[in-house]
Amino acid sequence: MIKCIRRVVLILLLVFFCSFSVVKAASYTTNYILFSNIASGNPSGLEKPNYRTPIPISGKRVNGSTFISLQELTLLGAIVSIDSTDSDIWYVNINGQLITFCNGSTNYTVDYNYTVIDRQNDTIQSYPLHYTGVSDLPAQIIDGVRYVRFTDAAKQCGSLLVTYNSTTNQAEAFHFRVSGSISAHTDNNTYIVGGPWLVNWAAKSTWSIAPHFKMSEMWSRLSQSSDPDYYNQIKISVKQLQVAENVRHYYNHDSPMTINCAFRSWAYNRSISNVARSFHSRGRAWDASNGAYGLYSQVYNEFKGSYSAPTVPVTNIYRSRVSGTSADLSQGYEIEKMPQNSSTWLHMQTPPQEGSDM
């Protein structure tokens, strides 16, 4: 009943915004958009990745801003729909989050409802998160087609970087789900996504997003001056949060576990590794201090199972031999080989639940 009442209140608020937030656009010219995956290797500049499998899209230029049709967000893996009782309310479902836009309103909302097992207390904890955002121009219908503000929509759908190319006069979004075809890469994880484009984002640092981990432990940590548009950006899978809870319980004796690095924004990842592609930037990796109990060695022993060592898919990675079995306590997938430069920590990552290069 409470959830139903909350849903009705949200819809009523959006209808209110629809009625009073309309901003008339002066012009509707074509504004080209490029969706791209992120190429491997070292990009030439800090601000822009190399293209990989690009998809060109015809958007709209509205009062100097780029708009994308609601339907084109399916190229990022979203499912779009219209409210059955109010055609001015539009939904974007992607990786466990519901983004709600309203025709004529600059306001949009973001909702999650996921669960994480608290291993310490053997309970299932629910996390109904709710964010709000405000665009500089409202969602609107142009020539019978529903359009939303490109920058806000692409960022909230999980794009790593959204930028404007002044040389080609096109807006660009770099997202790991882009496949270069009509279908996005499949990824069935739920991701918690957010950043400074949302209202009062910095104040959400203390929000619990798992039984023993808060938002600030998982978001990007480059300074605001170094990364102003993506300061404290986050994209982290619920699966990765569950792995953190598992390791904390089984291998850290239910003691606090220090996460040194989880999600990395584009600029943060470049500052750390000077490469374009990272499981941290995909939202499926974190680094934890080795701690008093030697987390790395314990997870390594889990990964090897009854063998002499885990498998080695690439030079610097170990992959678990017991994934999906009763012996798989962490539910992790891969760890980095240690030590590195005489230091040891636990780098844990999980797959996209799909396959290839996601």
Image: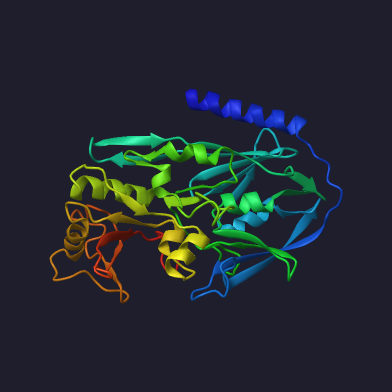
Q: Quadrant of residue 66?
A: bottom right
Q: In the visual, does 313 lie left or right of 165?
A: left
Compare residues 348 and 143 and report the one nearer the observer.
348
Q: Residue at x 54, y 26 (%)?
A: 6
Q: Does residue 9 lie above or below 51 as drawn?
A: above
Q: Position of residue 119 (x, y in %)?
A: 24, 41
Q: Residue at x 48, y 38 (%)?
A: 204
Q: Position of residue 327 (x, y in %)?
A: 18, 55
Compare residues 276 and 10 and report the one nearer the observer.
276
Q: Position of residue 75 (x, y in %)?
A: 60, 60
Q: Does residue 358 lie above or below 61 as drawn?
A: below
Q: Does residue 241 lie above or below 105 as drawn?
A: below
Q: How many marks?
A: 0
What colour-coding does the image apply? Answer: rainbow
Q: Residue at x 54, y 41 (%)?
A: 201
Q: Quadrant of residue 295?
A: bottom left
Residue furthest to the right: 26
Q: Position of residue 124 (x, y in %)?
A: 31, 36
Quadrant where the C terminus is found in the figure? bottom left
